[in-house]
Image (cartoon, rainbow, N blue to C red):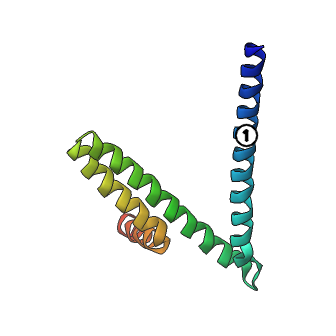
Amino acid sequence: MKQMHSKVKKIKGRGIQVYRMLMMISGFIFLWLGQMQVACATNYGEKAGTWILEQIFWIGLVFLGIALIGCLIKRAWVPALITGLCGGIILYFVKNPSQLSTIGENIANLIFT
């Protein structure tokens, strides 16, 4: 009887975990759909591209923060510094993609002229 009771508890526990996971996923989907209203304007292509770049910037910033926290917990100062510098440069170009095209044009003019 006890074994049956413990199995029922495990199944109920798993069901609650699955339910919570599905609720969290559906919540993220609804948040994402709510933020996509930016794309419903007149110049939706430009606004959608700007929105996607902005989201990529914030996601990259979160990943950079997690990587830096991991390095600092391990007291790896040099990898933390390198990660911070490289991540900062990448995030700068994600935030300002026109700068990357300007640098590319300058290099092309330097090489081919």
Q: Is residue 25 above or below residue 90?
A: above
Total tally of numbered discs in the picture: 1
Q: Secondary structure at mark 1?
A: helix
* Residue occupying the point 50% across, 64% down: 58
Instruction: Identify the image quadrant of the C terminus.
Output: bottom left
Q: Residue furthest bottom?
A: 42
Picture quarter containing residue 92?
bottom left
Q: Position of residue 43 (x, y in %)?
A: 72, 83
Q: Is residue 24 above or below residue 8?
A: below
* Residue occupying the point 48% across, 58% down: 60
30 vs 98, nearest the viewer = 30
Q: Is residue 72 above or below residue 97?
A: above
Q: Is residue 9 above or below residue 98?
A: above
Q: Position of residue 86 (x, y in %)?
A: 34, 55
103 vs 87, nearest the viewer = 87
* Residue occupying the point 46% across, 57% down: 62
* Residue occupying the point 27% across, 48% down: 80
Q: Amino acid at mark 1?
A: Ile
Q: Position of residue 21 (x, y in %)?
A: 70, 45
Picture quarter containing residue 42?
bottom right
Circle 1 sits on which residue?
A: 16
Instruction: Identify the image quadrant of the N terminus.
Output: top right
**Disc 1 residue crowd, few under 14, some 14–19, many 20+, Cα 10 Å:** few
